[in-house]
Amino acid sequence: MLSYTKYIHENSDIWVTFVHGAGGSSTIWHKQVKEFRKRFNVLLLDLRGHGDSVTSNFLENFSDTYTFDSLSEDIIEVINYEKIKQSHFIGISLGTIIIRTLAEKYPERVLSMVMGGAIMKLGFKSRLVLGLGMKLKKIMPYDKLYNVLTFFIMPYKNHKESRLLYIKESKKIYKEEFLKWFSLAVEINPLLRFFRSVEIKIPTLYIMGEEDYLFLPSIRKVVEKHTASNLFVVEDCGHVVNVEQPKLYNNMVLGYLAGF
């Protein structure tokens, strides 16, 4: 089972589950925990190969093949164990794909989805860099490759805090685990094409940085077509909105969840 942390609210039976992205860990939500604990029960997960789910004792319980189905089942195992019938799910980056996969399989478990730095399409630049990475992964140290990818996604000066946080957390990941996640990311376009074309009738808030140049354009198009979705764009902000603009992010998300 995944490593996780839970915070129980004395007067609420509503759960919020946080799902980080590839290379991160539950620590990337450190600017959210205090505020969300005031209103909800909070579940913080470390995905397989990340954070405290990175030890050999954890990894030997998982299959060698990583798919978004299996990663979503990891989360279901935790919420079943904790007897959580339903939850709001809050994700960032690649974590948003895991949440959407979970919602396709178990829509009755998902009250809403909050998708920060959401990925709905890999454009030409993304595919080019990932393809180059696949060729270089055998000769370039994996930590250097991750640093290059992180800079590509978060290139600007005001993205530095997010960039350094992800680089710091990535140092906990074994090489073999990194390569599994990297290969998974390379092959997601067919899945994303399905997500764009088929709307899931679960309330969804996309919260994106205006400087998230790789992923924001496709999210704008998705929200135009999907009637259960809304988009809020954060100015002067890149991919990791919850780290770069935490106060605005917290206010927007808490305001959104208050409507349920």
Image: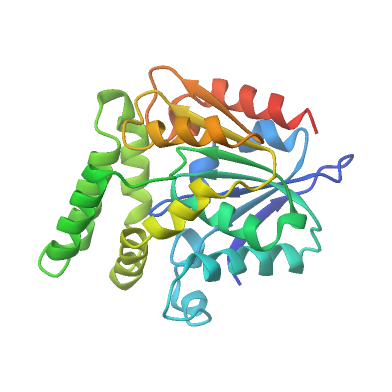
Residue 107 lies left or right of residue 56; in this view the side is: right
Q: Is residue 102 above or below residue 226?
A: below
Q: Nearer the viewer, residue 15 or 112?
A: 112
Q: Nearer the viewer, residue 259 or 227?
A: 227
Residue 130 lies left or right of residue 90; in this view the side is: left
Q: Is residue 251 above or below residue 160?
A: above
Q: Which residue is farthest left?
A: 139
Q: Which residue is farthest right?
A: 11
Residue at image location 41% in from the left, 36% down from the top = 218
Q: Nearer the viewer, residue 232 or 22?
A: 232
Can residue 77 be seen?
yes
Looking at the rendered structure, the number of numbered marks drawn on it comes to 0
Residue at image location 61% in from the left, 72% down from the top = 1
Q: Is residue 205 above or below residue 237?
A: below
Residue at image location 34% in from the left, 55% down from the top = 170
Q: Position of residue 217 (x, y in %)?
A: 38, 31
Image quarter where the C terminus lies is top right
Q: Position of residue 33 (x, y in %)?
A: 63, 38
**Quarter-wise, where is residue 84 in the image?**
bottom right
Can residue 96 be seen?
no
Q: Position of residue 245 (x, y in %)?
A: 48, 24
Q: Position of residue 112 (x, y in %)?
A: 70, 42
Q: Nearer the viewer, residue 220 or 206?
A: 220
